[in-house]
Image (cartoon, helix red, strand yellow):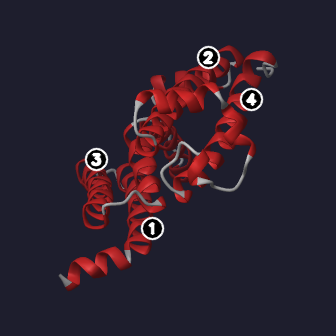
């Protein structure tokens, strides 16, 4: 019981420590794989990264099980875990190519494959950039809508009640949380949703700027 209370009390620093450990694992993967030429050993760090991500998901579930409430930390953990298993895969491939370039230069050899060079060339192509950012924008829209649907479900009693907030957005004009006039169950989720809405708007404008104002090759 004391161990469980300790985990809950130090959940935030524990999560930060796990995130730092997962980043170190990815960097060690590149050093061992491309710097020391030990491909088999390097896979250990990938498995460790997957294990740490699973532990993060377990921590979020444990917090919810013990407290019975949806906290800011639980939402942050969920976002990081979802990122790791979705967009994180593509970002890891970019990091992998970056490590090949840097470590290859230090060793005086070319570690990039033809496929790597093809992907690097694509990333410099304005039409490819615009297409990728449009896809990420649509993906963010889908995640945002799913997230808002979940939040509305937690804060409203039925479907008609939730739709009333969609049809009448006057509640958005108030920055302060008002439980009598809000679709969100508590102030924490209200604040997160407001911040997420701003980030979503900025991300949408930024992503579509590559389509409206394409960059030169």
Looking at the image, the residue that sits furthest to the front is 180
Residue under numbered circle 3: 39
Residue at figure coordinates x 45%, y 32% from the top left: 146
Query: Which numbered disc, 2 or 3, marks the residue closer to the eye?
Result: 2
Residue under numbered circle 4: 205
Closest to the observer, 14 or 114: 14
Query: Which numbered disc, 3 or 4, marks the residue closer to the eye?
Result: 4
Mark earlier in primary sequence (4, 1)? 1
Query: Which numbered disc, 2 or 1, marks the residue closer to the eye?
Result: 1
Residue at figure coordinates x 50%, y 44% from the top left: 95
Q: CA distance from mark 2 to mark 3?
A: 33 Å
Closest to the observer, 28 or 74: 74
Residue under numbered circle 1: 16
Looking at the image, the residue that sits furthest to the bottom is 2
Q: CA distance from mark 2 to mark 1?
A: 33 Å
Residue at figure coordinates x 76%, y 20% from the top left: 217
* Side of 36 where 199 appears, left or right: right
* Side of 166 where 126 appears, left or right: right
Mark earlier in primary sequence (2, 3)? 3
Query: Which numbered disc, 3 or 1, marks the residue closer to the eye?
Result: 1
Q: What numbered label is drawn on residue 131?
A: 2
Query: Which numbered disc, 4 or 2, marks the residue closer to the eye?
Result: 4
Mark earlier in primary sequence (3, 1)? 1
């Amino acid at each position: 019981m004391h161990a469980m209370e300790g985990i809950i009390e130090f959940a935030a620093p524990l999560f930060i420590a796990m995130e730092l450990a997962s980043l170190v694992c990815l960097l060690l993967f590149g050093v061992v794989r491309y710097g020391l030429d030990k491909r088999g050993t390097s896979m250990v760090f990938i498995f460790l990264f997957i294990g740490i991500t699973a532990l993060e998901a377990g921590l979020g579930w444990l917090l919810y099980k013990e407290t019975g409430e949806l906290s800011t930390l639980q939402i942050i953990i969920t976002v990081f875990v979802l990122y790791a298993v979705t967009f994180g895969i593509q970002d890891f491939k970019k990091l992998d190519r970056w490590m090949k370039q840097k470590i290859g230069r230090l060793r005086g050899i070319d570690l990039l494959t033809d496929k790597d060079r093809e992907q690097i060339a694509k990333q410099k192509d304005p039409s490819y950039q615009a297409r990728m950012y449009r896809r990420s924008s649509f993906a963010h829209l889908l995640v945002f809508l799913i997230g808002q649907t979940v939040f509305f479900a937690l804060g409203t009693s039925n479907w008609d009640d939730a739709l009333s907030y969609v049809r009448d957005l006057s509640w958005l004009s108030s920055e302060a949380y008002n439980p009598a006039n809000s679709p969100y169950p508590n102030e924490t989720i209200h604040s997160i949703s407001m911040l997420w809405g701003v980030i979503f708007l900025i991300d949408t404008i930024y992503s579509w700027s590559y389509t409206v104002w394409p960059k030169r090759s």
